[in-house]
Image (cartoon, rainbow, N blue to C red):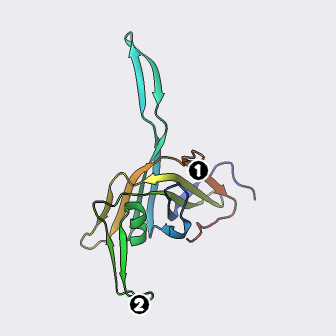
């Protein structure tokens, strides 16, 4: 059956974070999944400057689109937090007998760039994928502990687009569901 003319995505199946190197290329060996993904939302935005004169608006010019995004997941993955926040992870012991894991963020650790991939099943058949390119968590990174509740983590920021091909985001629809591949 061919791909439907419109996608009807439902739910959220996976979110994958892929760090970028200094040249803007993906570091796929360091890609991680956001555990218990609950939200991957974004909106396209653009700042405009207007020229006004003679009691009217004469022209308007955009500064280029960006994507404002938000993620939320259950629990915490130190590896996912590292991709969004920068910092270091130190393990005590060796796998599989690691006895302690510590994530540390210092004031000199800059937040890195990364790509965000999301996947949902589609009610019109197959599945639906979306990716936001060259993201930075320039909003808040949050984790909250509450009595009687699981820890939820959330992050927000902007996607600025690839440096090489200027892609800001992609949507794709597959006839047959395709999981986001493991790192």
Q: Nearer the viewer, mark 2 or mark 1?
A: 2
State the image coordinates of residue 19 (x, y, percent, origin top left): 49, 62
Residue that carries the numbered disc 2 in the rendered image: 97
Q: Is residue 46 above or below residue 182?
A: above
Q: Identify the residue at horizontal 36%, vertical 57% (top origin).
A: 110
Q: Identify the residue at horizontal 35%, vertical 64% (top origin).
A: 153
Q: Identify the residue at horizontal 63%, vertical 54% (top origin).
A: 172
- Of residue 32 and residue 72, the one placed in the foreground of this image is 32
Q: Is residue 55 above or below residue 103?
A: above
Residue 156 location, quadrant: bottom left
Helix, strand, or loop for circle 2?
loop
Q: Which mark is residue 35?
A: none
> Please, which residue is most extreme toward the left here?
147
Please identify the quadrant where the N terminus is shown.
bottom right
Residue 104 location, quadrant: bottom left
Few, some or many residues within 10 Å of mark 2 (<14, 14–19, 20+) = few
Helix, strand, or loop for circle 1?
strand
- Of residue 16 and residue 31, the one placed in the foreground of this image is 31
Residue 180 location, quadrant: bottom right
Residue that carries the numbered disc 1 in the rendered image: 170
State the image coordinates of residue 91 (x, y, percent, origin top left): 37, 81
- Of residue 182 and residue 134, the one placed in the foreground of this image is 134
N-terminal-most mark, 2 or 1: 2
Q: CA distance from mark 2 to mark 1?
A: 40 Å
Side of 150 where 135 appears, left or right: right
> Are the residues tagged 2 and 1 within 8 Å (C-beta)?
no
State the image coordinates of residue 62 (x, y, percent, origin top left): 47, 31
């Amino acid at each position: 059956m061919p791909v439907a003319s419109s996608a009807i995505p439902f739910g959220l199946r996976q979110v994958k974070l892929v760090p970028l190197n200094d040249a803007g290329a993906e570091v796929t060996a360091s890609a991680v999944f956001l555990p218990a993904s609950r939200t991957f939302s974004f909106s396209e935005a653009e700042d405009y400057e207007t020229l006004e004169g003679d009691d009217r608006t004469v022209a308007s010019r955009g500064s280029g689109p960006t994507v404002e995004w938000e993620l939320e997941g259950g629990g915490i993955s130190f590896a996912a937090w590292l991709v969004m926040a920068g910092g270091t992870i130190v393990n005590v012991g060796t796998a599989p007998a690691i006895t302690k894991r510590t994530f540390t963020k210092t004031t000199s650790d800059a937040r890195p760039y990364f790509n965000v991939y999301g996947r949902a099943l589609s009610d019109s058949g197959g599945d639906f994928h979306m990716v936001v390119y060259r993201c930075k968590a320039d909003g808040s990174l949050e984790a909250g502990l509450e009595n009687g509740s699981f820890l939820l983590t959330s992050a927000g920021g902007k996607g600025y687009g690839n440096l090489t091909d200027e892609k800001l985001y992609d949507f794709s629809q597959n006839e047959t569901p395709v999981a986001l591949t493991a790192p």
